Image (cartoon, rainbow, N blue to C red):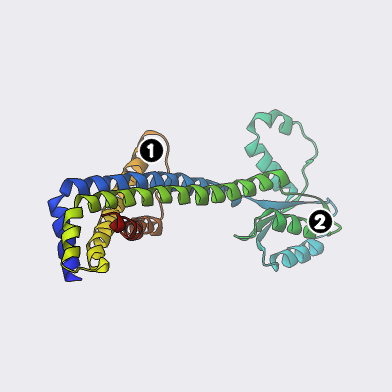
């Protein structure tokens, strides 16, 4: 193993331009992956923020008794899908409407009777905001005889959930595609390195070196190339994040495990691509 490390370092010193070019190619491929991850992450953050606002609102009859209301609140809070239940009185509903609809102040001022009903706002627990669960909770609360109507924005919830599924599938497909491109770039760089040293490999074979002995330095070179490329890609992605946040609009940086995973993925791509390339192209020299 010491010989393999020494040979890999010697190869890098002998051809620093080739190593730098290979690392740059890997960095460019992983940089594209990083940009896509940045977009996908911020899209998911935005969808999560919208999802947090999903709730079921049950509008109550004016003759609802407080005892019935307390029982209903206690029963709803006992459901594992429900995070909280909040009672909104008629008076509070009118105040909220006046705050949120400032353009209709004249209309509110002319009211002699409060037309807005009291309601129960049912906040759902994280992981329980999908359309099926929201619909089930809505049907559950609508059974109470003092509930006049139940609303939860069915079309809006369905679209949010659909966007989440589309973004997840798109992230998986494009991420896999970009990863494959990065692997091909690393394999191409390793192939160039092998053919640049084909005479050395030929001599090593003449003196009885096994394919495993010849292969190890190239595998280490692939790991090094992928690791440097991953670090460069992380730096470029972070620079893009700062530029977008400063020039366009605020965005969130990638989670730490994502960044570390991307860098390690570069090293893994280098190892796997090198192994495949060496196995294939050693037969051609």
Question: Marks 1 and 2, how far apart in space?
Answer: 46 Å
* Residue hosting label 1: 244
Name the outermost residue toward the front.
Answer: 206
- Which residue is depicted at the point 78% across and 46% down? 117
Q: Is residue 253 above or below residue 111?
A: below
Q: Is residue 279 above or below residue 61?
A: below
Q: Secondary structure at mark 1?
A: helix
Q: Is residue 36 left or right of residue 115?
A: left
The foreground one among 21 and 157 is 21
- Which residue is depicted at the point 28% across and 52% down? 190
Q: Which mark is residue 196?
A: none
- Which residue is depicted at the point 46% across and 48% down? 177
Q: Which quarter of the rendering shows the C terminus?
A: bottom left
Asked where in the image residue 272 lies, by quadrant, the reply is bottom left
Q: Which mark is residue 142?
A: 2
The foreground one among 93 and 267 is 267
- Visible in this render: residue 269? yes
Name the outermost residue toward the bottom.
Answer: 1
Residue 130 x/y as whole percent: 66, 55
């Amino acid at each position: 193993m010491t010989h393999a490390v020494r040979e890999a370092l010697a190869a890098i010193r002998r051809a620093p331009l080739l190593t730098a070019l290979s690392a740059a190619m890997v960095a460019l491929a992983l940089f594209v992956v990083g940009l896509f991850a940045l977009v996908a992450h911020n899209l998911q953050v935005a969808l999560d923020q919208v999802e947090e606002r999903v709730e079921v609102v049950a509008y109550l009859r004016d003759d609802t008794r407080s005892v019935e209301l307390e029982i209903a609140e206690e029963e709803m809070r006992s459901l594992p899908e429900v995070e909280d239940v909040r009672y909104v009185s008629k008076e509070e509903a009118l105040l909220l409407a006046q705050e949120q609809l400032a353009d209709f102040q004249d209309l509110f001022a002319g009211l002699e009777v409060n037309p807005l009903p009291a309601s129960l706002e049912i906040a759902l627990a994280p992981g329980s905001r999908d359309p099926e669960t929201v619909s089930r909770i809505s049907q559950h609360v609508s059974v109470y005889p003092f509930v006049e109507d139940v609303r939860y924005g069915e079309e809006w919830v369905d679209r949010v959930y659909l966007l989440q599924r589309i973004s997840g599938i798109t992230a998986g497909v494009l991420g896999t595609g970009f990863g494959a491109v990065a692997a091909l770039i690393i394999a191409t760089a390793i192939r160039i390195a092998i053919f640049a040293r084909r005479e050395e490999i030929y001599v090593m074979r003449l003196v009885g070196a096994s394919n495993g002995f010849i292969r190890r330095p190239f595998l280490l070179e692939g790991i090094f190339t992928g690791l440097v490329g991953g670090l460069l890609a992380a730096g470029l992605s972070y620079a893009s994040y700062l530029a977008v946040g400063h020039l366009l609009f605020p965005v969130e940086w990638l989670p730490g495990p994502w960044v570390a995973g991307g860098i390690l993925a570069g090293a893994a791509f280098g190892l796997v691509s090198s192994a495949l390339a060496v196995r294939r192209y050693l037969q051609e020299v």
